[in-house]
Image (cartoon, rainbow, N blue to C red):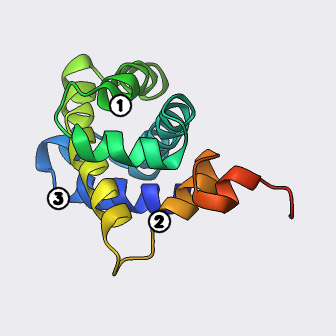
Amino acid sequence: MFDQILQLVKDQMSGNSSASAAIPAGQEDAVHHEIATHIHDGLQNQAASQGGAGGLLSMLTGSMASGSPITSAIEGGLASSLGSRFGLPPMATGAIAAALPGILQKFAHKANDPNDQSITTDSMASSFGGGGGLGGMLGGMFK
């Protein structure tokens, strides 16, 4: 799941000139990795509080705007981390954080697209824990 999120981050950042301009030259991979880590961890935390992958997907689909609970939960920690780890000023971290709704929207779209198996409810349940049908209910009992 992390690799799919990282690819979404790279795709979104390359198509967003203000966000990509905020990333210091030569640090793109490290910044993309940091963004993907915060998104993955934020989604994992939200999945736990939303009753698993199904609840997370419902929440993602229902609230894609900036200021949504998921976006807000990820933005604060991400901006702080980008500032402290990479020395980015608030203007730069804000431009990068502004790309989060687009990344989460693409994530939700992929998860809801029956023709795209790169992100599924089951893969979300496996990565984030719980809520993925019978497999999610049984957890790792048969692994």
Label 2 packing within 10 angstroms: few (<14), some (14-19), many (20+) = many
Instruction: Identify the mark at residue 70; answer none if there is no mark.
Output: 1
Q: Are marks 1 and 3 in contact (CB under 8 Å)?
A: no
Q: Identify the residue under disc 3.
A: 15
Q: In the picture shown, does residue 46 fall above or below 105?
A: above
Residue visible at 26% across and 32% down in the picture:
97
The x, y position of residue 126, in whole percent, is: 64, 56
- Residue 137 visible in the picture: yes
Q: Identify the residue under disc 2.
A: 120
Q: Which three-letter amino acid code belongs to the residue tagged 3? A: Gly
Secondary structure at badge 2 equals: loop
Q: Earlier in the sequence, mark 1 or mark 2?
A: 1
45 sits left or right of 115 in the view: right
Residue visible at 49% across and 26% down in the picture:
85
Nearer to us in this view, 13 or 65: 65
Label 3 packing within 10 angstroms: few (<14), some (14-19), many (20+) = few
The x, y position of residue 98, in whole percent, is: 19, 34
Q: How far apart are the alpha carbons under marks 1 and 3? A: 22 Å
Q: Which three-letter amino acid code belongs to the residue tagged 2? A: Thr
Q: Quadrant of the C terminus?
A: bottom right
Instruction: Identify the mark at residue 7; answer none if there is no mark.
Output: none
The x, y position of residue 44, in whole percent, is: 55, 39
Q: Earlier in the sequence, mark 2 or mark 3?
A: 3
